[in-house]
């Protein structure tokens, strides 16, 4: 059995510790296995909830403590050396008696609901090497007496509610390998003394929010450090050059702080770095080419900083890179280096929201493992290279808001043909892409996309496609949820086959040049929540099948040449919140059924040829933000029931009547707030004032 090592206490540094330790010598001399048993029974008595009765039926005086669950004794069964109650769903506190377990080497209470503070008596556990208290609700300060545990190697206090600052005394525990304090409520600076922990391998302060100050240069002395995690805190200042000595560092996590200055080029000489997280800070300057030296690097996160300049070619040397993220630096410019796609392990590239220009390098065909490519909001141009079809693992491709041009590929230059079977999200909107000029059809593009069996989102909006929709649109995967092609100069009629897209929730073909009628097959898209065909040249009446869309929330058919009656069955779509039928040629009376739509927020029927009286039961509308019936041929008096309506409520009745009056007689926009919410009457009055202005203006016009 090990003897107490008090004779080793010669150095001045440990004098205090010796005095402290010797005061417990007497206790240790008098303890034995019976003390251990009573200490553990004291712990049991402090457990207030043991839902699985793990201790209740097991920790009994009738059996030896060495047979108790969670207890390990030494080889002679003479003393308890380990207490492990991990993940037992226990609630309770740690009594001071635990300090009597004088031979304890490991104390593990991880993942329970222990609370309260740590009793000072734990400082008597001279032999303790492992103290794991993570995932509990311990509170109070991290005790400075921990610094007097001479053999402690692993100290895990993560995910608790410890407050206060990190005690400098921890710097005394030179045996410490592992210091995990993440996700607590600690604040203050990192004490310089941490630099004394020459055996430290993991130093983790992640997610404390308020630990502040700069990184002390002394951290650079920790030559065994493998992980340094300071993310989600309030650090500032630049990175001290002394960190260059951390030649075993694999993880440097500094994200979500206020670090500043340039990204130091010496990072390039950390020979084992695998993960470098510098995101969400205020780093400036450019990306040092030396980063290309860290061939061990797997994750490079530099997003949301103020970095500018080009992406260095040397990044292409990072043969182990899996994730590369420069998102939202605003000022990173120049071309995407062709060498990047030569990295065969690359899975995710996020370069969106920068000022990159030039084309996508054709080397993208070498990125066999690429799963996500985000390039949106840059100044990229040129064609989308054919070779992208080699990137067969691609799941998310977001190229929107750039200046890409040329035809959307077809079978002859088979961009998306066949290979991109894993594509889930394809966003090409706001570019200069066209349809293949010879056919004037999106045919081949759409046909090849039918191979993407898990496609969920397809957005082509704001491209000058100037083409027609092929019937093969019906072959797109039923997994498709969103299809948007707004403002694409799409001509011709809407194919009936669109009805096959049975899981579509959003279909937006607004602001095109579509002709013909609204296909009855639209009624088959039962999951549809948003349907917009506004701003086209559609004719005929609204087919009653539209009323089958019982999940529809928004229906936009404004600005077409639709005519005939407004189908009364629209009133059956109880989910409808927005109904825009304005600027058409509907010529019926307003069907009374519309007033029974429970949740309608906005109703715009303006600029049609609607006639007749305003239905008396307008007051049935429960929730309304906007009604616009202007530009019709409505007539009639204010319905006498109007004073009873929810629409009006009690307050300011006369002002609101004026508003309703304006609907009926002058027919301008009327905005009424939700009466249930009791919104500030000033808002209502503001809206009414607006109406009055409009009212006066429209009088002036006539
Ligand atoms: C431990 O650390 C503290 C603070 O750094 C120091 O004052 C003390 O002398 C050290 N020694 C012992 C044995 O606690
Ligand atoms: C207590 O639990 C241990 C470990 O599960 C088991 O070996 C022992 O038999 C149990 N003792 C009693 C009295 O249930
Ligand atoms: C924590 O303990 C619970 C209950 O025993 C268990 O289900 C869960 O997996 C544990 N979680 C961790 C992170 O160990
Ligand atoms: C164990 O510790 C408690 C509290 O620290 C103390 O009151 C008690 O005397 C100790 N028992 C033994 C047997 O040493
Ligand atoms: C203590 O921490 C080190 C370094 O992280 C680790 O390798 C070791 O397995 C840990 N020891 C125990 C007993 O948990
Ligand atoms: C942590 O401590 C704070 C302050 O004492 C308290 O408001 C909060 O509820 C505690 N959180 C947990 C999870 O115990
Ligand atoms: C640790 O680092 C500090 C600051 O970089 C330095 O002054 C000190 O001499 C170093 N200590 C040891 C023991 O290397
Ligand atoms: C690291 O990279 C820089 C710039 O790319 C280069 O000049 C230097 O020689 C490299 N250093 C090492 C040690 O490879
Ligand atoms: C791509 O990498 C290979 C070796 O992995 C190399 O031979 C080739 O020159 C590289 N190409 C580019 C464009 O960097
Ligand atoms: C596409 O992949 C094949 C190997 O499957 C390769 O031979 C070809 O060069 C790649 N194309 C491009 C343009 O990178
Ligand atoms: C799509 O809708 C069909 C019914 O039309 C349904 O059977 C299927 O589970 C849905 N598929 C997905 C991926 O949501
Ligand atoms: C509505 O318009 C259609 C065609 O424009 C016409 O046939 C019909 O008679 C009109 N109905 C009414 C009530 O004006």
Image (cartoon, rainbow, N blue to C red):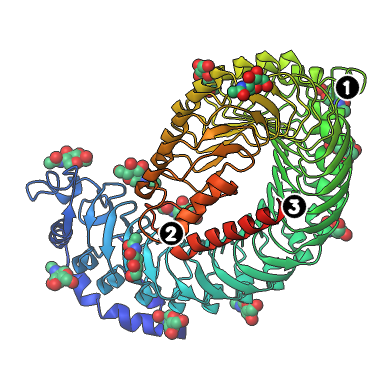
Q: Could you tell me if residue 86 is visible in this image?
A: yes
Q: Are marks 1 and 2 in contact (CB under 8 Å)?
A: no
Find numbered disc 1 in the image and state the secondary structure of the residue it sits on. Answer: loop
Residue, far left: 62
Q: Which residue is mark 2?
A: 654
| x and y, in percent, of residue 238 in the image | 69, 73
| x and y, in percent, of residue 685 in the image | 50, 63
Q: Quadrant of ligand 10?
A: top right
Q: Quadrant of the N terminus?
A: bottom left
Q: Is residue 687 left or right of residue 399?
A: left
Q: Which is more toward the observer, 457 or 282?
A: 457
Q: Which is more toward the observer, 292 or 377?
A: 377
Above or below — where is 322 with respect to 139? above
- Residue shown at 18% from the left, 59% from the top: 43
Q: CA distance from mark 3 to mark 2?
A: 51 Å
Above or below — where is 206 with respect to 189? above
Q: CA distance from mark 1 to mark 2?
A: 67 Å
Give the mark nearer the N terminus: 1 vs 2.
Answer: 1
Find numbered disc 2 in the image and state the secondary structure of the residue it sits on. Answer: helix
**Which of the labelled discs sits on residue 488, or is there none?**
none
Above or below — where is 672 with respect to 641? below
How many marks are shown on the rendered structure?
Answer: 3
Find numbered disc 3 in the image and state the secondary structure of the residue it sits on. Answer: loop
Q: Which residue is mark 3?
A: 353
Q: Which residue is mark 1?
A: 413
Give the mark nearer the N terminus: 3 vs 2.
Answer: 3
Q: Callout 3: 10 Å neighbours few (<14), some, many (20+)? A: many
Give the mark nearer the N terminus: 1 vs 3.
Answer: 3
- Residue shown at 16% from the left, 51% from the top: 65
Quarter occupied by residue 140: bottom left
- Residue shown at 37% from the left, 80% from the top: 17
């Amino acid at each position: 059995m090990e003897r107490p090592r008090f004779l080793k206490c010669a150095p001045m540094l440990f004098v205090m510790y010796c005095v402290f330790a010797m005061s417990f010598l007497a206790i240790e001399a008098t303890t034995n296995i019976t003390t251990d048993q009573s200490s553990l029974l004291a712990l049991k008595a402090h457990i207030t909830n043991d839902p699985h009765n793990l201790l209740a039926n097991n920790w009994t005086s009738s059996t030896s403590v060495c047979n108790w669950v969670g207890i390990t004794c030494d080889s002679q069964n003479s003393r308890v050396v380990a207490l492990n109650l991990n993940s037992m769903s226990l609630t309770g506190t740690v009594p001071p008696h635990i300090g009597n377990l004088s031979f304890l080497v490991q104390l593990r209470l991880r993942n329970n609901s222990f609370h309260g503070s740590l009793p000072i008596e734990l400082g008597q556990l001279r032999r303790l090497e492992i103290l794991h208290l993570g995932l509990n609700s311990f509170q109070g300060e991290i005790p400075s007496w921990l610094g007097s545990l001479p053999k402690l190697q692993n100290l895990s206090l993560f995910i608790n509610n410890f407050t206060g600052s990190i005690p400098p005394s921890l710097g005394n525990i030179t045996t410490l390998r592992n210091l995990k304090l993440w996700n607590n409520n600690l604040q203050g600076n990192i004490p310089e003394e941490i630099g004394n922990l020459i055996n430290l391998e993991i130093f983790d302060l992640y997610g404390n929010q308020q630990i502040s100050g700069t990184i002390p240069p002394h951290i650079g002395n920790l030559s065994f450090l493998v992980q340094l995690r300071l993310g989600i805190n309030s650090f500032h200042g630049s990175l001290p050059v002394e960190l260059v000595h951390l030649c075993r560092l694999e993880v440097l996590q500094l994200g979500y702080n206020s670090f500043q200055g340039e990204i130091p080029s010496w990072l390039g000489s950390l020979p084992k770095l695998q993960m470098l997280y510098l995101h969400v800070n205020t780093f400036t300057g450019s990306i040092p080419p030396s980063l290309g030296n860290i061939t061990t690097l797997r994750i490079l996160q530099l997003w949301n900083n103020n970095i500018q300049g080009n992406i260095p070619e040397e990044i292409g040397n990072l043969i182990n890179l899996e994730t590369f993220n420069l998102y939202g630096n605003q000022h990173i410019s120049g071309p995407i280096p062709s060498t990047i796609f030569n990295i065969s392990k690359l899975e995710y590239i996020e370069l969106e929201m920068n000022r990159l220009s030039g084309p996508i390098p054709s080397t993208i065909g070498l990125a066999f493992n690429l799963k996500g490519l985000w390039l949106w909001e840059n100044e990229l141009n040129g064609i989308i290279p054919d070779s992208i079809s080699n990137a067969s693992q691609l799941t998310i491709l977001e190229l929107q808001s750039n200046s890409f041009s040329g035809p959307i590929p077809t079978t002859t230059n088979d961009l998306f043909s066949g290979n991109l079977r894993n594509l889930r999200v394809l966003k090409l909107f706001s570019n200069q892409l066209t349809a293949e000029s010879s056919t004037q059809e999106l045919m081949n593009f759409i046909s090849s996309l039918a191979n993407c069996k898990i496609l969920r989102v397809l957005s082509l909006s704001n491209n000058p496609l100037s083409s027609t929709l092929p019937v093969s649109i019906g072959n797109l995967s039923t997994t498709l949820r969103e299809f948007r092609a707004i403002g694409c100069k799409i001509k011709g009629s809407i194919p009936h086959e669109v009805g096959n897209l049975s899981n579509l929730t959003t279909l937006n073909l607004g602001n095109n040049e579509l002709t013909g009628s609204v296909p009855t097959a639209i009624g088959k898209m039962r999951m549809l929540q948003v349907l917009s065909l506004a701003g086209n040249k559609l004719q005929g009446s609204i087919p009653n099948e539209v009323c089958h869309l019982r999940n529809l929330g928004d229906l936009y058919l404004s600005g077409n040449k639709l005519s005939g009656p407004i189908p009364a069955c629209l009133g059956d779509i109880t989910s409808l919140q927005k109904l825009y039928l304005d600027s058409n040629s509907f010529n019926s009376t307003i069907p009374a059924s519309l007033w029974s739509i429970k949740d309608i927020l906005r109703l715009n029927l303006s600029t049609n040829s609607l006639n007749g009286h305003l239905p008396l039961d307008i007051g049935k509308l429960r929730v309304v933000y906007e009604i616009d019936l202007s530009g019709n041929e409505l007539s009639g008096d204010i319905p006498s029931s109007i004073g009873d309506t929810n629409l009006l409520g009690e307050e300011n009745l006369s002002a609101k009547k004026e508003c309703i009056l304006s609907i009926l007689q002058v027919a301008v926009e009327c905005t009424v707030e939700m009466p249930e919410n009791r919104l500030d009457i000033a808002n209502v009055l503001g809206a009414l004032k607006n109406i009055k202005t409009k009212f006066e203006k429209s009088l002036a016009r006539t």
